[in-house]
Amino acid sequence: MTSALPSPLQNRKTAAITPSKPPQLTPTLDLDSLNQKFDQASATELIEWGAQTFGDRLVMSTSFGIQSAVMLGLVTSVIPEVPVIWVDTGYLPAATYRFADELTQRLSLNLKVYQSPLSPARMEALHGKLWEEGTVEAFNQYDSIRKVEPMQRALKELKATAWLTGLRSQQTDHRKTLGRIAIQESRYKLMPILHWTSRDIWAYLKEHDLPYHPYFKEGYVSVGDWHSSRPVAAGDTDGRATRFKGLKQECGIHIPQTPEEAESLNSSSL
């Protein structure tokens, strides 16, 4: 843990903030100034600013993945009633569903579950088992149906102006380029733990007695759908190589969908 970064152990449970209602039209924010201001701020400080700035138009997302308890614990300690969006693909491991239920009960999550209007059986009947095709194009189609569309619908229905996510710069090349506050498709995206290391994650979970996903003990560093996730192998260059058969690093949810950025989904070097 470098001395330049705020320790995650500084982010202890604080008095809950009651979000104020934002004005009808949120003014355009100066991202350069904000990123300079919050670059070295603690995760809790950024969450508090988000609650005060965006009020009840602030949401968060979770995948109930390996390290998801960190963001769920951090955010709900500041905003207990924050809407938590979970995109359930219908193909998650049984352990993920049990893990989600455990954390939902323990943290009293205001959980909002979204799914594709196409059931898994209907999708397979119309398009086949896309994950078996072994191409980036097939994975992109799968992700668009099961992940991207439900997430975009969730943000629209919840009238979100801003979105808290647990992205970390160490996870993919694309995420290394991000600031802690960004804009994606006209919404602000806040990334409180962007600079955290795996050691920071471990320290926070231990301090707050929160669990990793059960698959962590089986060698997984990232887990998504059962058919497209595996434990780390000796030849893996990074944890995201264990997802999508190593063909790509992003599912599309965290990539703005301009034509140029959508095209970048086809790259395995995101």
Image: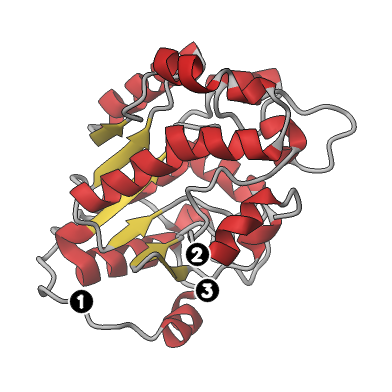
User: Which residue is the site of mark 1?
Assistant: 26
User: Which residue is the site of mark 3?
Assistant: 40
User: Which residue is the site of mark 2?
Assistant: 258
Residue closest to the far front: 126
Which residue is at a point 28% across and 31% down the rendered structure image? 113
Which residue is at a point 46% across and 71% down the rendered structure image? 41
Q: How much space separates mark 1 and mark 2, taking CA atoms?
A: 22 Å
Which residue is at a point 45% across and 76% down the rendered structure image? 38
**For the residue marked with disc 3, what is the amino acid?**
Gln
**For the residue marked with disc 2, what is the amino acid?**
Thr
The answer to which of marks 2 and 3 sits earlier in the sequence is: 3
The quarter in which the N terminus is drawn is bottom right
**Nearest the eye: 196 or 165:** 165
**Nearest the eye: 237 or 246:** 246
Whether residue 72 is visible, yes or no, is: no
Vertical order, 70 against 7 (above or below): above
Image quarter for residue 132?
top right
| Label 1 Cα crowd, 10 Å radius (few <14 / some 14-19 / many 20+) | few
Q: How much space separates mark 2 and mark 3, taking CA atoms?
A: 30 Å
Label 3 secondary element: loop
Image quarter for residue 42?
bottom left
Mark nearest the camera among 1 and 3 is 1
